[in-house]
Image (cartoon, rainbow, N blue to C red):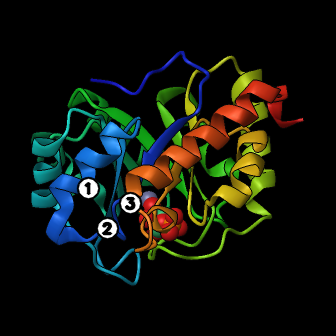
């Protein structure tokens, strides 16, 4: 099972961080029915970020609820200690923070050796230079558009310039790795992140507003996304 590489159609990877966990299986199935391309799972350790969310058993439970790829975002220090456990739990993609591991190439290689896709994530203040050397080895770069740790924050607009520069770097180098954007993405700013060059849209609290079912909100994202793509996305974030 893989995220659909090669397709330039942007993907939606809903984050269940703000979901009602007592209904998690049903919510994941609703998101799948509504056209989600993956499920984004935010693992927080209370050290790398000032919050604790959930861990390996929840990833395994979501694996039992859906056939979708599991896009696991590890906001934990020393993620290399847990890679095989997340693989066994059914992760498809493991994204680690460049700020959280000392030997980035070794950790990315270990993810690939487990047969998983490997992603690297950058906090808003981390420059692209931090991933220049690892870029050819990864399947995805996750650009944090908020400081990680909590759902429901406001997107930092300045980070979109970083997304544009990353888009150009990937395209100029002829690489196929995807750009994911994560944090504060709503219907109102979806077009700007797409135009900056994002391939994977992570959205959390916008789907869980307690007024409308998450599936119907996800469908609105898909409609807006398809409308932007139909109008054409300029190459390299121009
Ligand atoms: C934040 C997480 C995000 C979060 C997104 O640290 O990485 O994935 O769940 O939630 P919203 O869309 O509410 O910012
Ligand atoms: Zn995330």
> Horizontal placement of 229 versus 92: left or right?
right
Real-space Cα separation, disc 2 to disc 1, in angstroms: 8 Å
Q: Earlier in the sequence, mark 2 or mark 1?
A: 2
Real-space Cα separation, disc 3 to disc 2, in angstroms: 11 Å
> Residue at 90% of width from left, 35% of height from top?
238
Contact flag, marks 1 and 3 (Cβ < 8 Å)? no
Q: Earlier in the sequence, mark 1 or mark 3?
A: 1
Whole-percent x, y for residue 142 in the image: 54, 48
Crowding at mark 1 (Cα within 10 Å: few <14, some 14-19, many 20+): many
Residue located farthest toward the right when viewing the structure as drawn: 238
On the image, numbered disc 1 is attached to which residue? 27
Contact flag, marks 2 and 1 (Cβ < 8 Å)? yes
For label 1, the SS is helix
Q: Earlier in the sequence, mark 3 or mark 2?
A: 2
Can residue 102 be seen? no
> Horizontal placement of 157 versus 117: left or right?
right
> Image quarter for residue 94?
top left
Q: Nearer the viewer, residue 56 or 211?
A: 211
Q: Is mark 2 within 8 Å of ligand 1?
A: no
For label 3, the SS is loop
On the image, numbered disc 2 is attached to which residue? 19
- Give the label, 1 or 3, closer to the camera: 3
Whole-percent x, y for residue 93 in the image: 33, 38
On the image, numbered disc 3 is attached to which residue? 213
């Amino acid at each position: 099972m893989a995220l659909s590489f090669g397709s330039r159609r942007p993907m939606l990877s809903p984050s269940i961080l703000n979901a009602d966990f007592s209904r998690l299986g049903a919510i994941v199935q609703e998101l799948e029915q509504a056209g989600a391309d993956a499920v984004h799972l935010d693992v927080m350790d209370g050290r790398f970020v000032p919050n604790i969310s959930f861990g390996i058993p929840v990833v395994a439970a979501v694996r039992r609820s859906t056939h979708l790829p599991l896009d696991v975002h590890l906001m934990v220090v020393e993620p290399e200690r847990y890679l095989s456990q997340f693989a066994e739990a059914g992760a498809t993609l493991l994204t680690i923070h460049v700020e959280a591991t000392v030997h980035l190439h070794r950790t990315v290689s270990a993810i690939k050796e487990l047969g998983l896709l490997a992603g690297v994530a950058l906090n808003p203040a981390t420059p692209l230079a931090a991933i220049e050397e690892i870029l050819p080895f990864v399947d995805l770069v996750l650009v944090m558009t908020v400081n990680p740790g909590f759902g429901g924050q406001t997107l930092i607009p300045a980070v979109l310039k970083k997304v544009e520069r990353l888009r150009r770097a990937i395209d100029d180098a002829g690489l196929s790795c995807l750009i994911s954007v994560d944090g504060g993405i709503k219907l109102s700013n979806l077009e700007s992140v797409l135009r900056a060059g994002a391939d994977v849209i992570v959205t959390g609290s916008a789907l869980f507003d307690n007024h409308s079912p998450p599936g119907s909100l996800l469908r609105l994202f898909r409609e807006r996304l398809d409308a932007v793509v139909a109008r054409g996305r300029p190459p390299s974030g121009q």
